[in-house]
Amino acid sequence: MEIVSLSREHWEKWNQFCIQSDDAWFLHTTWWLEYSLKHKPELLGKSKSFFITDGSRILAICPLIVEEHEHQGVGHKEFSCSGSYGVAPATSNELSEKGRRKILRLLFDHIDSLAMNSHVERMSIRCSPLSPSYSITSAPQFNWLMSYNLMDVSLNTQVIDLDNDLENIWRSMRRDTRKQIDNASQYLTVQIFNNENITRDIFDKYRELHCLAAGRVTRPASTFEMMYSWIQMGFAVLVGAILEGEYVGFFLVTTYKSGAYNGSSCRDPNHHKIPVGHFLRWEIARWLKAQNFKYYEIGIQQYNWLLHDFPSQKEINISEAKRGLGGLTIPLFQGEKYYSKDYFRQILHNRVDHYASKL
């Protein structure tokens, strides 16, 4: 077996592997990897991604980015993704369970070697619940990252099971959420743009509203161009809410295999009282079901502070609002690994102090 660093010449076969592997979702592709490297240029991200091959086929892939993080005024290198969690490795469907464990051991050993050579002090990765190998509706699974010496720092996420009847999905929502959607439907209309009808003019409206909602340009122009290309390739849709002929909100939803993820969103701050988010999520769910998607992930669930997660009250409120749309609350498996004792002590000490400040 051979370990090969990912370069542009390997992109096509890497992405073909992602299509075939049940462990892989859009977050494993080179398109997402490229986006992540450009998303926060201040982190100076560099790809350390690699794959394992037997000479004739890819057995596993590992998207991996090293970034520069500042902690207490000092720079630290980490394996992360746009300042957050990277994605866990994906293996070939052709491997037996024993073969998968063997390949993953080799893979994680190589990550450790890369960490040592690049002076990386922490790794943070998560599993994608939209990958086909994650059985959303079956019995709970365990965080397999712990088998490879990562600490469990899992959270939860909310997923709508689109195999359900629309009527059942509607009934599973909270009553106040249904009422908000009904009220919004009286004055809002929806337009969905995919690779058949997206135009530069429409996408620029989303980009302009994104800037207006944030009060500034939040990321490089190149990342918007990448999102536009995703729509053109059929890996995303842009969904707009229209009020009296004007767009007052947009969602860009990533679509890949049988799953969809609520990605970038924005709304006109001049119409903040209109429940644009609930309205659009419901219309998106209806459209996705009509297109035979199985799962629609609407976002992370945060209830209170944990030792590894400190959501703001606004983030807690957003999570509660998303739960109003019904669906399933499922584990979002995450893992951390430290390569520096001092850095681990600093991070843990800071987390303990932060948590204690609320007691």
Image: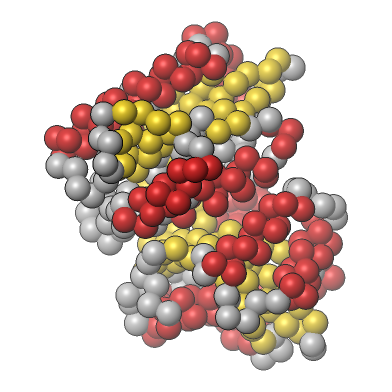
Instruction: Give the camera-side residue of 242 and 43.
Output: 43
Q: Residue lying farthest top?
A: 342
Quadrant of the rendered image containing residue 110: top left
| In the depicted structure, whether residue 132 falls above or below residue 238 | above
- Residue at the spot x=67%, y=43% of the render? 38
**Is there any visible trace of residue 308 in the rendered image?**
no
Q: Percent from the top left, x then y, of residue 204?
A: 78, 69
Quadrant of the rendered image containing residue 280: bottom right
In this rendering, would 34 be left or right of 164?
right
Instruction: Give the camera-side residue of 244 and 111.
Output: 111
- Residue at the spot x=75%, y=48% of the render? 219
Q: Percent from the top left, x then y, of residue 215?
A: 85, 55
| In the depicted structure, whether residue 283 falls above or below residue 346 | below
| In the depicted structure, whether residue 255 falls above or below residue 336 | below
Q: Percent from the top left, x then y, of residue 183?
A: 64, 85
Q: Looking at the figure, which quarter contains the N terminus?
A: top left
In this rendering, would 1 be left or right of 281?
left
- Residue at the spot x=59%, y=86% of the render? 182
Q: Percent from the top left, x then y, of residue 173?
A: 46, 74
| In the depicted structure, whether residue 345 falls above or below residue 256 | above
